[in-house]
Image (tube, rainbow, N blue to C red):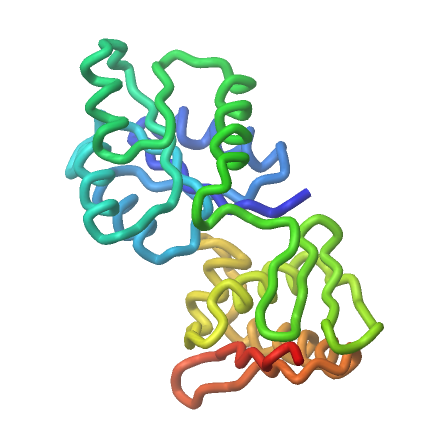
């Protein structure tokens, strides 16, 4: 299963926690935010593949969150949740950039179906069957990492896969240890930032094994960057 990372922005604690548990049980990685402002800041990190966003919330409502992220050029798919059921409200949500809309109360099976549907639309940020960066290819179904110039490949364990996927999707950009930790272990993790160094070491050994020219460079005082080599 492709490991998608979802964000649930919902002020009702019971519902938020229930959704996170249900999504986790279905194999997703899920975090939560208790109000619109917190949700907005988390969405801006670029860590999430899809957002489940309530409309009626304190501090900043969901429609304002949606308006701001679209204005910021963030195209992460968004499914709106709300108690409002009028056609006008639904149209407003879609016009502001929502990808789908669900009215409370709803069945979890339907929400899961909507998530799959939005994912199949192939929006930006959605996992691809094969992720490519330079001469590296990562199969997001089998977790197999290979090099276009060689015959060797290796299957990555889950944490290494998540880290490599994040590096490849952001090839050429410097990712801090904090960003990597939050992406792989989550915001509420007790994992230390030096865990990142350990897993980077594991990945470098895998890269050496498959004989890729692509390297993971340490950027002093900042973090790590995947420097993708040409696949010639």
Q: Residue at x 28, y 15 (%)?
A: 83
What percent of the width, then of the height, locates residue 123?
Answer: 45, 43
What percent of the width, then of the height, locates residue 20?
Answer: 49, 34
Residue 33 quadrant: top left
Image label count = 0
Q: Residue at x 21, y 17 (%)?
A: 89
Nearer-the-camera pick, 168 or 8: 168
Residue 232 quadrant: bottom right
Q: Which residue sits furthest front?
A: 232
Nearer-the-camera pick, 211 or 8: 211
Left or right of 88 in this view: 109: right
Q: Is residue 98 above or below residue 225?
A: above
Nearer-the-camera pick, 11 or 80: 80
Q: Residue at x 65, y 61 (%)?
A: 161
What percent of the width, then of the height, locates residue 53?
Answer: 33, 33
What percent of the width, then of the height, locates residue 127?
Answer: 56, 48
Q: Which residue sits furthest top?
A: 86
Residue 220 quadrant: bottom left
Q: Is residue 29 above or below residue 103?
A: below
Nearer-the-camera pick, 130 or 201: 130
Q: Residue at x 53, y 81 (%)?
A: 227
Q: Which residue sits furthest right?
A: 151
Give the quarter of the figure containing the N terminus: top right
Q: Is residue 215 above or below residue 89?
A: below
């Amino acid at each position: 299963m492709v490991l998608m990372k979802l964000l649930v922005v919902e002020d009702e604690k019971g519902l938020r926690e229930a959704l996170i548990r249900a999504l986790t049980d279905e194999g997703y990685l899920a975090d939560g935010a208790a109000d619109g402002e917190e949700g907005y800041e988390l969405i801006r990190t670029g860590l999430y593949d899809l957002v489940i966003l309530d409309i009626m919330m304190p501090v900043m409502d969901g429609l304002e969150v949606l308006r701001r992220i679209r204005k910021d050029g963030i195209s992460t798919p968004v499914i709106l949740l709300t108690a409002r059921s009028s056609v006008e409200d639904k149209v407003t949500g879609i016009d502001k950039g929502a990808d789908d809309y669900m009215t409370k109360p709803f069945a979890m099976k339907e929400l899961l179906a909507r998530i799959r549907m939005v994912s199949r639309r192939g929006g930006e940020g959605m996992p691809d069957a094969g992720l490519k960066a330079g001469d590296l290819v990562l199969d997001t179904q089998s977790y197999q990492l290979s090099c276009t110039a060689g015959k060797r490949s290796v299957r990555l364990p889950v944490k290494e896969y998540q880290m490599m996927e994040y590096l490849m999707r952001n090839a050429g950009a410097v990712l801090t240890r904090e960003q990597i930790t939050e992406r792989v272990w989550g915001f509420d993790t007790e994992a230390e930032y030096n865990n990142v160094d350990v897993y980077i070491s594991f990945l470098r050994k895998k890269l050496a094994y498959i004989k890729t020219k692509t390297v993971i460079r340490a950027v002093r005082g900042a973090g790590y960057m995947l420097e993708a080599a040409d696949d010639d």
